[in-house]
Image (cartoon, grey):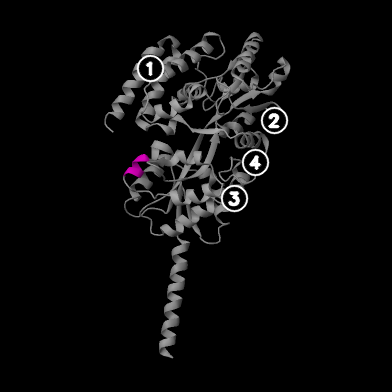
Amino acid sequence: MKKITSLFVGFLFLFFTNISIAAEVQFYHDKAGWQDWWVEIFEMDSNNSYEITPFADTTTFQATVRQSLRADPPELFTWWAGYRMKDMVDSGLVEDLSPLWKKYIDAGEVSPDLAKAFQFDGKTYAVPNLIAFWPMYYNKKIYAELGLEVPTTWEQLESNFTKIKASGRTPVGQTIEGRWPAFIWFEEFLIRSNPDFYEDLVEGRAKYTDPEVEEAFLTWKSWMDKGWMDDGSASFGFTTGDSMNNSFSKGDVVHMLVGTWFASTVTGAGIAEGEEWGYFIMPNKDASMQPAVIFEAGPIMVAANAKNKDAALDALDFWMSEQASAKWTELMFFPPHNLKADLPGGEVGKLVKQINDENYRQINRYWEATPTVICEAAVDEIAKFVVDPTSYKDVMVGLQAIADSYWSKQ
């Protein structure tokens, strides 16, 4: 009888110990405004419970995560994609999630293009907490007034610009306010001519002095020379004054190339989504090429030294599911990461349907796709071109010097 009791007590100890382990999934994130939504979605996971910790200050968040990764890290944490997570990968501080991705790719539930945002040497180290595409925002009222149609070819796009300019408006807004937006049109002109070259460039297999880069700068320069783009001094609306978004809402600027995450700011300026503004994806210069779109994705990673790594991997398995993706899309209006999940409504839902139905090539944004030390310096170099478009050859040389300084050490 004592032996049976002992075995039973031992069983209970192991049972409750295992429950305790499964329940201790710590999750750190720097999106304090999303806290209620994180809680709501992870409450749907019946296999685990979570301790979800928001950080309101990004600097404190980064310092806390980095300090904890070698000792007592959270099981899960958000970060920044591409090369901005590479130092953690190189140091072995984050878990390889390739088996999880294979499961969902093989099932046809996620796009393999999406994995590229978190991939090094063929291994994938994160799952997406958000996805944003980079379409052209356009003013539907002005399109109707001028009798314009959404362009499906490069020629139609430029024809629209000519008619908009003739009406006394600026066809396209651009900005270098805040430094980082300088790369937006640089990457866009590159992928519209040669997306393979773009991916070689950001990975150091091509040069900024190559003819493809010169072609991109010359196209960009021609748009500015024709008065199709403003001078780049306007801001996205992150500062006060006559921002590009204000100009767009007033109809002075008719197009903006911005991520889908900017939609709430556009509607906040007083123009209605779907009625007064919409999206289209820039057409390629060569209509025979596969259609393409720039995307960005924020990662969730698993700490390699996490105490409850199995529970963390199980949590991300739930996160990648159709059920969780659909709920996250419902809560946040982000494009779903699981292809079987219902699409959001409105303009973003139409956009994602187009991308999925027409098999768009999804290309990682420059800010994450190239090494951080290159990108941070490159945006200042590209800004010189925006201020003085005749400087493009000097800018190309300057960009290559920045790249050489990094790649020569790798």
Q: Amino acid at mark 1?
A: Met
Residue 152: x percent and y percent?
A: 63, 23
Task: Give the spatial CA distance, label 3 vs label 4.
Answer: 14 Å
- On screen, residue 95 versus residue 287, left or right, reads left
Which residue is denoted by mark 4 in the rendering? 344
Disc 2 crowd, CA 10 A, few/some/many (<14, 14-19, 20+): few
Determine contact: label 3, label 4, CB under 8 Å.
no
Task: Let me know if residue 55 appears in the view.
Answer: no
Specify the segment rendered in magenta: 86-90
Q: Amino acid at mark 2?
A: Gly
Among the two numbered marks 2 and 3 on one chain, the one whose residue lies closer to the N terminus: 2
Determine contact: label 1, label 4, CB under 8 Å.
no
Which residue is denoted by mark 2 in the rendering? 274
Label 2, secondary structure: give it.
Answer: loop
Among the two numbered marks 3 and 4 on one chain, the one whose residue lies closer to the N terminus: 3
Tell me the mark number nearer the camera, choosing from 2 and 1.
Answer: 1
Among the two numbered marks 1 and 4 on one chain, the one whose residue lies closer to the N terminus: 4
Among the two numbered marks 2 and 1 on one chain, the one whose residue lies closer to the N terminus: 2
Which residue is denoted by mark 3 in the rendering? 322
- On screen, residue 191 versus residue 83, left or right, reads right
Label 3, secondary structure: give it.
Answer: helix
Residue 388: x percent and y percent?
A: 43, 11
Q: Amino acid at mark 4?
A: Pro
Mark number displayed over residue 396:
1
Q: Residue furthest toward the left?
A: 409
